[in-house]
Each structure stands twice: as structure tokens, then as C-alpha cells.
Image (cartoon, rainbow, N blue to C red):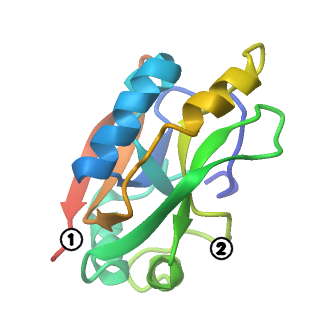
Amino acid sequence: MKENAPSNAVSPQGRRVLVAVVNGEPGERIQAWRLQHDPREAARIPPHTTLCYWATGLDVDDLGLQVCHAFPAAIPIGLGEVAEFEDEQGTFYVKMLQTSALDAARRRLYDATHLDMGPAREWPWHVTCVRNTNGRDRRTLRSAAATLAPGDTWLLDEVACLELRGDRYETVRSWRLDR
């Protein structure tokens, strides 16, 4: 398994990621905004926060056991304004707030109770809005980002293992979390 960390490298075919899919009204709002301002990425992968950047090669049944262990119930997550990462792609993202329950779930996800997913690594929780702003008018994107109102709370109630097939990520398996 490759290092479990965010990367701007081109993803190889067959790459698998583990994500929490942003569903409900917040997901619809974010996706509508993405379709307008980053249609390629919006078609490639649903609005999400990444739980494991490199899930390729992990047994899906064991992964499901580990996911259910890590997420015994749905988690309410606060959503904030759009911000920008200071990375080479100038990524725009929705801030995630009140993430202590999600932090605890991440620790359980990597505790190897059912599946060794490698070492846990922390990164800022976020929902990407525009992955790559290079060659784009960032001032215009910032103005547009100010209009994105994702909603106050998102109920994290679905975790999915996605695999890159062609030019988009397809669901290999997903798990609905108890409400």
C-alpha cells in the first residue's frame, strides 16, 4: 500500500480510496456548485472527505468490518466556509467543523482490529470544491466560493470504497451507518 497521504499525483487506474460521501442537502449543494465550477472533478468523484487515500489491495470484506468498527453510528459534522489550501494546485475546499467524533473514528479505523490499514496519519478534514485552480482566475473562484452555502451540518452516514475506472471513481462497496 502506498503512503496514506493526500497527493496531487495522477491516480493510476484501479486506485481505491475510502471516503465518507457527503449526502443529503449539503451534498446536493456542494455537488451543484462543483458541477458549475469544477465539472471534470464533479463527474469524476462525488463530494466526500477522504478516510484512506490508498485502499488499493485491501480486502473489501475485512475493510467493511473495520469501517463498521470505526463508525458504529452516523456522525454529525459542522460545515464551514470555503477556504484554499496552500498547495501547488490551489485547491478550494469546504471546512469541516466539530470533528472530534470523526477524529475518534479515524483512530478506530486505523487500530487494526479487523484489518491492518497501515499507520494512521492525520490531515485536515475537508470537502474539495475545486481540485486544481492552476490557470484559472482565482479571484473569480473566490467570489463564487463565497456563494456556496453547504448548510450548517452534514450527517456522515455513508462510507464507500471507490475505485478509479476510466475517468471516474466507481463504488466497489458502501456501508450505511446507523442513525
Q: Along the line of sight, which residue is nearer the eye, 34 or 159?
A: 34
Tell whether label 2 touches label 1 (CB within 8 Å): no
Residue 52 can be seen, yes or no: no
Looking at numbered disc 1 in the image, what kind of residue is underneath it?
Leu
Most extreme residue toward the top, as rendered?
Answer: 135
Mark 1 Cα within 10 Å, few/some/many (few <14, many 20+)? some
Q: Left or right: where does residue 130 sit relative to residue 104?
A: right
Write down the quadrant of residue 132 in the picture. Answer: top right
Secondary element under disc 2, as helix, strand or loop, is loop
Give the residue number, with chain letter if any, for mark 2: 119
Specify the label residue 142 is tagged with.
Answer: none
Residue 155 can be seen, yes or no: yes
Q: Along the line of sight, which residue is nearer the eye, 111 or 1?
A: 111
Write down the quadrant of residue 171 in the picture. Answer: top left
| Alpha carbon distance from label 1 to label 2 | 24 Å
Give the residue number, with chain letter if any, for mark 1: 177
Q: Which residue is depicted at the point 28% across and 40% down?
A: 28
Classify the position of the N terminus by image quarter: bottom right
Q: Is residue 163 above or below residue 20?
A: above
Relative image position of residue 60 (x, y in whole percent): 31, 57
Q: Left or right: where does residue 110 sit relative to residue 68?
A: right
Relative image position of residue 133 (x, y in whole percent): 71, 24
Q: Which residue is depicted at the point 34% across and 71% down?
A: 67
Q: Along the line of sight, which residue is nearer the eye, 25 or 75?
A: 25
Q: Which residue is depicted at the point 49% across and 47% down?
A: 56
Q: Which residue is depicted at the point 57% across and 29% down?
A: 144
Looking at numbered disc 2 in the image, what kind of residue is underneath it?
Pro
Q: Along the line of sight, which residue is nearer the eye, 56 or 120?
A: 120
Relative image position of residue 35 (x, y in whole percent): 40, 22
Q: Left or right: where does residue 33 sit relative to residue 130?
A: left
Secondary element under disc 1, as helix, strand or loop, is loop
